[in-house]
Amino acid sequence: MPNVNKMSDHPELLKQLALEVIAGIPLDEAKIYTDGSKGETNSTGSGVLIELTGRVFKLQKRNADHASVFRMELIAIMCGLSFINNIRDLAVSEIWILTDRR
């Protein structure tokens, strides 16, 4: 993927590049999409969408108020990896974590 910058590159270009990466991931590999969000009242939460060989799982976690978005993303990644780790007989060669944070 080319070097991109969320602040200066056009959102449509960023979206297209992300879709190209996602389309190139083989179907038999696990994909974890994460998002952290902060509400108007400083309430925070983490969301995870996991794709495993045609199955989709959605997880949400309420975080402590005033947590940083970076921390929320890390919590989402940890929740996704923990979920995958607890599935018995999971046969994937790679796990892709797709997030909008560095």
Image: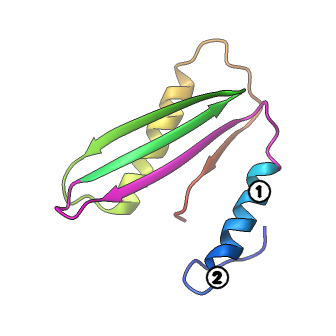
> In screen coordinates, is 10 left or right of 40?
right
User: Crowding at label 2, few (<14), some or many (≥20) Cα neighbours within 10 Å?
Assistant: few
> In screen coordinates, is 58 left or right of 93?
left
The residue most toward the bottom is: 8
Report which residue position mark 2 lands on. Answer: 10
Q: Earlier in the sequence, mark 1 or mark 2?
A: 2
Name the residue at 67% across, 67% down. Answer: 15
**Can residue 39 be found in the magenta stretch?**
yes
The residue closer to the viewer here, 102 or 59, is 59
Q: Secondary structure at mark 1?
A: helix
Give the tally of numbered discs: 2
In the rendered image, the quadrant that contains the N terminus is: bottom right
Name the residue at 43% across, 34% down. Answer: 59
The residue most toward the top is: 89
Q: Magenta residues?
A: 24-43
Q: Dividing the picture into quarters, in which one does residue 37 lie?
A: bottom left
Task: Judge whether 34 appears above or below 91 on screen.
Answer: below
Give the label on residue 96, or none. none
Q: Dividing the picture into quarters, in which one does residue 65 lie?
A: bottom left
Name the residue at 21% across, 55% down. Answer: 43
Residue 10 in the image, given as x and y percentages of width and height: 64, 82
Task: Judge whether 65 appears above or below 85 on screen.
Answer: below
Report which residue position mark 1 lands on. Answer: 21
> In screen coordinates, is 56 left or right of 76?
right
Q: Amino acid at mark 2?
A: His
